Image (spheres, rainbow, N blue to C red):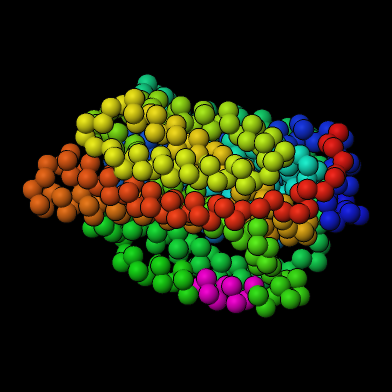
Amino acid sequence: MTLQDTSPATGSVNAQRVAKPGPVIALLVVSAFVVILNETTMGVALTPIMQDLDITAGSAQWLTTGFLLTMAIVIPLTGYLLEKFPLRRVFIAAMTLFSIGTLIAALAPGFGMLLIGRVVQASGTAIMMPLLFTTVLNVVPASHRGRMMGVISVVIAVAPAVGPTVSGLILSSLSWQVIFWILLPIALIALTLGALWVRNVTDTRPDARFDLLSVILSAFSFGGLVFGLSSIGESASGHAPVPVWIPLVIGAVSLSLFVARQLRLQKTDGALLDLRTFQSRSFSLAIVLVVVVMAALFGSLILLPIYLAQVLGLDVLAVGLMLLPGGVLMGVMAPIIGNLFDRFGPTPLVIPGMIVAAGALWGMASFDETTAVGWIIAVHLMLNLGLGAVFTPLMTSALGSLPPRLYPHGSAIVGTVQQVAGATGTAAFVTLFTLTTAAAVESGASEVLAKAEGVHAAFLVGAIVASVAVVLAFFVRKPADLSADLPAMH
């Protein structure tokens, strides 16, 4: 069934036709949380997987890199998928793929099968966040979107943060396969409930065009960039599978061709990814800040565990437990920030949020081999406090500034940017850490002192970039359509 929205400016008709959107959105949020949580559980699990399967670090890294590559390739396709097919069918396809991939990974007898399972998982994961964004934009009135996007922020920010903790708790007494066996029944329950509850609440375009050349260019563009960025850290330590410049150049050239083709195709509404979203000033500015925020989040998520384990000498479980309070804080904050956004708009939240986040990164730049655990937890809480105040306002301002016909494309662009920004942050932090550490070792420093210097250099650059982003935060405004007097949700 295709619903025709007779009020394109607000999408409120769809909200009225869904008598109780709460359970459906709750199901989508839980499903998205599970699939995103899975994305970051592998980091802590790589060491036991290497030992159990007798593989090298380079091979094991593909369990993460392959996942990110698949996400980068599939997410740009979601704009087309959500235009072409009913929402219920897309949800069932996404959760089915994730469930099958999880089962394959749980049963994997060796590295090859485990990698296939991760790729299939990623195919489903890539669809979930754009699907969730698009659903909320269509069924939730603009006056309540901040609250709902606050809940979604839990998925975006908290799931990656608690992934290492969950993984560490499991691996402290059980095998790595248990991670997938725990995820599988949750995914199957979500799939079953989705088949019963999810309805088609978005407009579809049966005539939506599938441009194969755009898909190919998209795969080389975002796949090349993410692969190249993910390989920078390995390259800095001399273990990259190919020279880093090759995938980066391929990605950059393909991206130029991809953009040119989309600009031509969108004139006839045939673009795979409609770039007219960037005609919205609010969307463009928010996207720039999202890049900084996601880079800071994922960069710190990758570097803090390295610092805690290799400089301070903490074990896996201790590292996971130290990172947990920050994730919990962000989860508690998200609905509060959403309510504040609905009342006051983004400006009073984004500006102090960016200042606090930048201040936290400056605090992290002070970490060394003698830093107290209490101070590390406090600064990590500070970082999550700042980022938590920024996520919801940026997402809501960006997507809420678009006309309903561009919701699927805006959601796909946000998802794609998150992946590229996450890869960029990870690459930048790891590269700075690796190069500075190597230079310190050559100058005669001990390995622990050298790594402490590497951590300092990485967080220092992150703090400088975040401080520049504070200036941009002053220009974030609430889109006009979000201020309209719209009917409340039933």
Quick check: 199 left or right of 42? Answer: right
Q: Residue furthest left?
A: 444
Over which residues does the magenta segment extend? Answer: 254-262
Q: Nearer the viewer, residue 169 or 53?
A: 169
Quick check: 323 left or right of 327? Answer: left
Q: What is the magenta segment's predominant secondary structure?
A: helix
Q: Residue furthest top?
A: 173
Instruction: Give the percent coordinates (x, y) of residue 381.
Output: 44, 31
For the image, the number of numbered tags is 0
Q: Please name the residue shown 50% across and 67% down the image.
A: 220
Q: Please name the residue shown 16% across and 54% down the image.
A: 439
Q: Nearer the viewer, residue 302 or 397?
A: 397
Instruction: Give the percent coordinates (x, y) of residue 283.
Output: 64, 58
Above or below, 219 relative to 182: below
Instruction: Give the percent coordinates (x, y) of residue 110.
Output: 38, 42
Residue 450 position by quadrant: top left
Instruction: Give the percent coordinates (x, y) of residue 376.
Output: 34, 31
- Residue 309 is at least partly visible in this image: yes
Residue 232 position by quadrant: bottom left
Q: Please name the residue shown 38% across and 48% down the image.
A: 463
- Residue 113 is at least partly visible in this image: no
Q: Any magenta on residue 342?
A: no
Q: Please name the residue shown 35% across and 69% down the image.
A: 245
Q: Quadrant of the C terminus?
A: top right
Quick check: 360 left or right of 276? Answer: left
